[in-house]
Amino acid sequence: MMLDAWVQTLPIGLQNIARTGYLAVGVFFVLSGFVLSRSYAATTWSRANLIRYGVGRFARVYPIYLVSLVVIAPFIFEDLVSPGRPGVVSSMKPWLLADYGLVLQGWAGVLPVQWNAPAWSLSCELFFYVCFPVAVLLFARMGRTGMILAAVLALAAPLWYRWMSVPVAWKPVIYFADFLAGIAAAAIYGRLEDSSVWLRGRGYLLYAPATVLGLFLVANPWLVTSSIGMNSALRPLNVLLLIGLALGGGIPVQALSARLSVFLGQASYSMYILHIPLLWWYKRFWLYTSGLLPQTASAAVYFAGVVMVSSAAYTMLEEPANRRIRDWAAARLRASSRK
């Protein structure tokens, strides 16, 4: 919003790219399936390992999400106690709290409050976490056939969505295709890594054309029919992008492997889940309300603030909470095994 006036001065193609950053959520879902598949490829899904996995997934997502709710707690309270809040009736208030507290926003459709709008994606991620052990076992046991089936299901998602009449409001089901694409991408990468010496270190042959074509589609959305949708059109390109980056090679891989990039990547979840709560406060900060700064400069201050606060949150809250929850669970499992 702060950059909208500047964005309107750009060519229409660049405007389209600037306004569709939300499409990166699909990249993240593919990445999630890819990373989980690689991380748990050798896991035997015993009861203890399932508990470790479940606790680890909770520890990864919920602590900093809870922090985000604490950050916007005054605004949540204001909305809930205000009798004249547009679109919010008394009977809805407990359900809104439940939706946010239990991370169910992704199943609820359009909510009358936008306390932390990006959190709908956590509903998807938690759904993927629940499905992952079953999905990876099923596809892994089928070998190459499983890899092909996962890829086909991911790429043909618009067809089976319509065939099964999947409600648009069920975002975790809608975006499950991206997660499946990540599982397929991990299997394809594993085979290429083992068998294709020529491609190793030349991943730019995959990620460079995938990036160029993806940006071209985003800049020219009229090329994609509404029956397919932009996210589905980008899904195979996202697969090529991640496989190419994993294979390595080229300046982008070197830049993403730098220490600062790795740290910002680790802190990116905190940035993602805190940037809207921080915006709630920033828009009430005198530097913004006074109008002393041009909108572009104000946006730069906000962006820098989000990076700094989120980096601190990752270092002092997210990572320590993640580690302590995992250590607590591991200690309980060890104690249980000795009985």
Image (cartoon, grey):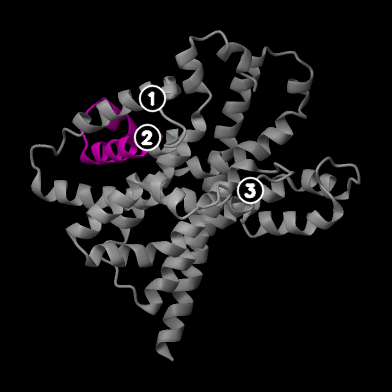
Number of the label disc, if any, that sits on residue 217: 1
N-term mark: 2 or 3: 3
Residue carrying label 3: 109
Amino acid type, label 3: Gly
Q: Which residues are magenta?
A: 233-260
- Report the residue at 58% width, 56% height from top: 63
Measured in 3D between alpha carbons, the distance from the residue under mark 2 to the one under mark 3, in whole angstroms, is 23 Å
The majority secondary structure of the magenta stretch comes to: helix
The answer to whether residue 258 is seen in the rendering is yes
Q: Does 252 lie within the magenta span?
A: yes
Which of these two is toward me, 152 or 258? Answer: 152
Relative to 338, say whether 231 is above or below: above
Q: Residues within 10 Å of mark 3 (few under 14, many from 20)?
A: some
Q: Is residue 59 magenta?
A: no
Residue 187 horizontal/vertical position (percent): 23, 53
User: In this image, 249 relative to 43: left or right?
Assistant: left
Mark 2 — residue? 234
